Image (cartoon, grey):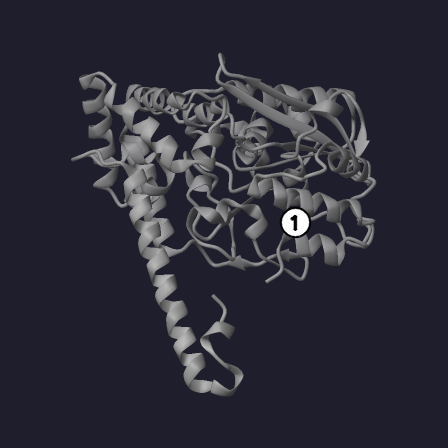
Amino acid sequence: MPNLLDYVQSLGQNAFSDLPFSAPDSLALTQIVYLPMETLQGQSVTISGLYTHLAQTYPDGFTDTYQKKRYRLIQACAESDRFASIQITDYINHIDPHQETQFCAATFHLPDGGRYVAFRGTDLTIAGWKEDLNMSFMRVPAQREAVCYVEKTAAAYHGPLLLGGHSKGGHLALFAAAHVPAAVQNRLIRAYSFDGPGVDEDTLSSEAYEHIKARVESYIPQSSVVGMLLCYHPVYQVVRSNTIGLLQHDAMTWQIKNGSFETLPGLDVSAHVTDEALRQWIDHLSLEDRRKLTDTVFYIVSALDSDTVDPLMQDFPASSRKLFNAFRKLDPETRAHTRRIMGDLFSSGASEAARLLLPATMRNTSAITQPATQLAEHLKERQARVKEKQEEIRERLREKIPKLIKNDGDLPS
């Protein structure tokens, strides 16, 4: 089924005057803002120029799976009439571990004269992940920076505005839309959120949010977990993804048909149960419990001795041992408190989401085991099944097409 890359490649020769700006176009811009532009900060560059810059700066490409997809996407955009000449300005990427802040945004100059502000979602920095969890019990710096960024953009330009983002970027788009002054809100055409966490209850029930909610477009995949965290705008569209579980958070897996997202009537039943259980679990945690849990998780993650969570992604077995040892070093009271909170989560219907969202070190509330050992056993079993299947196929070849096989030495190893 066609995805965002297919959309750009198939409809990229259509000018916006022929095919008006749409949600898939918005999603494409939110993916481009994930790409590194630090060396271009303070400059104006077209999407075509950005691709050329990235090709020269990263001749070997990207190692991260998601960045590889985004690199292919911007290449397609750079080769299309629709996106190539769009200018990008006011790029900012602010990461402050001490303030637990990660904020990144850029402004895209649309051909009709409008300005599209795209907010980046969470990157691999420890500061970014800590700030995401902090949102469950406090206002975070990125929210304030998002509001200031939009206000500054509006002051420098007097036309229509659009906001958008994927993941945390989607949350920042909604938060900024609801907290900028009324004069700026009046110029807002759309605020797009792509599987972004919802806004807090105070924002959701405010007059300011009421003023812009008709201009909000929220999209989440059918098994969304990330996009259903915190409170949420009651109106959202469910998009079909070609993968499963948390992998659906990858917007490059979302399906597009005839220039629009392929939508579904609602969330998967299992996802709905999980999302509701997660929300109830979070709602029943006191603000102090949320703070302590967040601090504990990131104390453990800090054992990786890195500014990013990349080691956890690249070498999970080795990293999990460090996480396990860090958990054991917690004082008894903190360990007991963490196990109690995790026990409440696993007794709810959100246990499957917890297995995907939380470090494996935190999961077992009755006995701590080493995830690396479990993973190794799982891989060993899988390899054995694959080998058995290969042997079965070889035997069938010998039986069905003996004329094509002269001897065992001709068989593939």
Q: Position of residue 108 (x, y in %)?
A: 74, 34
Q: Residue at x 40, y 37 (%)?
A: 316
Please state which of residues 3 and 16 is positioned toward the viewer in this rendering: 3
Q: Quadrant of residue 54?
A: top right
Please state which of residues 36 and 130 is positioned toward the viewer in this rendering: 36
Please state which of residues 72 and 397 is positioned toward the viewer in this rendering: 397
Residue 199 higher or lower than 395, as above or below: above
Residue 9 higher or lower than 215, as above or below: below
Q: Residue at x 50, y 59 (%)?
A: 264
Q: Residue at x 47, y 48 (%)?
A: 247
Q: Position of residue 319 (x, y in %)?
A: 38, 31
Q: Residues within 10 Å of mark 1 (few under 14, many from 20)?
A: some
> In this orientation, does residue 33 appear?
yes
- Placement of the N terminus among the 4 image quadrants: bottom right
> In this orientation, does residue 216 appear?
no
Q: Position of residue 81 (x, y in %)?
A: 83, 49
Residue 11 higher or lower than 148, as above or below: below
Q: Residue at x 73, y 23 (%)?
A: 39
Task: Inspect the image, locate mark 1, and give the three-letter code of the amino acid beneath it.
Answer: Pro
Residue on which the image places disc 1: 24
Q: Position of residue 262 (x, y in %)?
A: 57, 59
Q: Is residue 358 left or right of residue 244?
A: left
Q: Is residue 391 left or right of residue 327?
A: right
